[in-house]
Image (cartoon, rainbow, N blue to C red):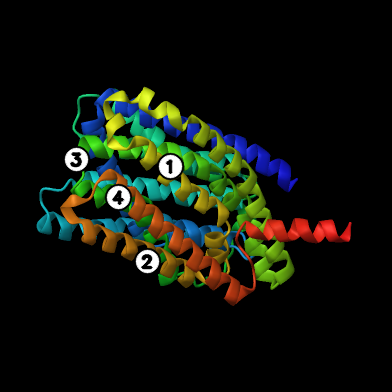
Amino acid sequence: MARQSAIQTLGLRAGVVGINFAVMLGLAGLLGFEVFGRLAALWGAALVAGTVLSLGGPVILLRLLTDGKGMRARDICTITLVYPAILALLIYACAINLAPTWSWGAILGAGFAANVLACLASVMRALGSVQASMALRDAGPQVALGLAGVLGPHAAADTIVASAALTMSALALCGLIWVCRHKDMSGVLSTIWRPYWSASLWASSVLGMVVAQVDLIIGGAVISAEQLGVYAVLRRVANLVALPVTVATWVSAPVISAAHGKGDARSLASASAQGSQIAMWPGLVLFAIAMLAMPLLPLLLPEYADDGLTLIFAILLLGALGQVVFASSFGVATLCNVPRYAMMARLGMVVLYLLWFAFWGADLTATTNAVGYVGALSLGCVALWWAVWRHLGVDTSAFVLLNMRRWAWKTS
């Protein structure tokens, strides 16, 4: 059943990534690389704002609603809507005075809406929906952005982001109706208040989104908008290799949470290995396909052939493969009451990248940007794997699959 669910979810994830990829390429072609580069930076800022406003809500809901104890309905609403709305208003009141030229309304509005979608997706996942929850969480924001871009091809980047926020709000309403009418909703509800606030969990979520966008936001300060647009396209293509990572995390999350809740170390190790297995083999296939397709880049983008397209793409591919190798690390750390390790790893990634950026300054290019970003991510992943292994005794890397196969061969 788990393997069948993983295959179905991987198929859905491939469809979601295909949709997101088509939206990205469509926007780049419709708006041009220069406008698309500005939109990518602004959209990245909105996604970071969403995780700041979330206070760790999506992960909190996923963890507490899947451990068998449930949560009160009012607490779910408070985490999803009330706290993020209050924080958004406070940030807007301060930011509009500190940086009045920034499009804070669009950034915070889109971030708030994206967070609501993520929270609803966590509730849907707790209700047993793997496919619909993933589609809402991962495809919803990007589809909303694509619709906004198509309906306003000549609009400014901040207007497109604001329109995407309105579209995400409509999607959130549909998700809310789905959740409220679900027959198993009473099964994840409780009448007892449970402590749910976790500063390290929130910080880990925020830093995770910062890590995902830092090279676009910070690097975009010195890289031209056109070069940044090309870089963003290459990074999105390379990230296709890491497509199975989200599937592995989404499928194995309830099993990992349940195993930890029972204190079953053997089941926890098995769930982690299952996540690695789900991610590794498809990831290797996608990596091989991407490597074979690499020579086509200069033919597809001849006007940028002299800007090191192939080298940038190869570096980004290696970074995506590293995420596949350590696919289970962040899920295990987050769901097993050691989110501080995930937070510290992501903080280390951001710090290392910022140090790299400070070293190069205005001389930073798209190539050196990729090197710094991938290097920071890889070192952070290795550090988290080591910390989880020492604390929980669980090998969250894909190398555990080799040990399992070797053990099976010896006993056969």
- Label placed on residue 347: 2
Residue beneath disc 4 = 368
Residue 77 lies left or right of residue 188; in this view the side is: left
Q: Position of residue 112 (x, y in %)?
A: 33, 50
Residue 163 lies left or right of residue 346; in this view the side is: left
Q: Where is residue 309 in the image (x, y as percent from the top left)?
A: 34, 36
Q: Position of residue 113 (x, y in %)?
A: 36, 46
Residue beneath disc 3 = 224
Q: In which quarter of the image is residue 130?
A: top right
The N terminus lies in quadrant: top right
Q: Which amino acid does label 4 sit on?
A: Thr
**Whether residue 227 is situated above or below residue 254 in the rendered picture:** above
Q: What residue type is labelled 3?
A: Ser
Q: Which of marks 2 and 1 is in front?
A: 1
Q: CB atoms at circles 4 and 1 under 8 Å apart? A: no
**If you read the primary sequence from the N terminus, does the residue marked by circle 2 or circle 1 appear first?**
1
Residue beneath disc 1 = 314
Q: Nearer the viewer, mark 3 or mark 4?
A: 4
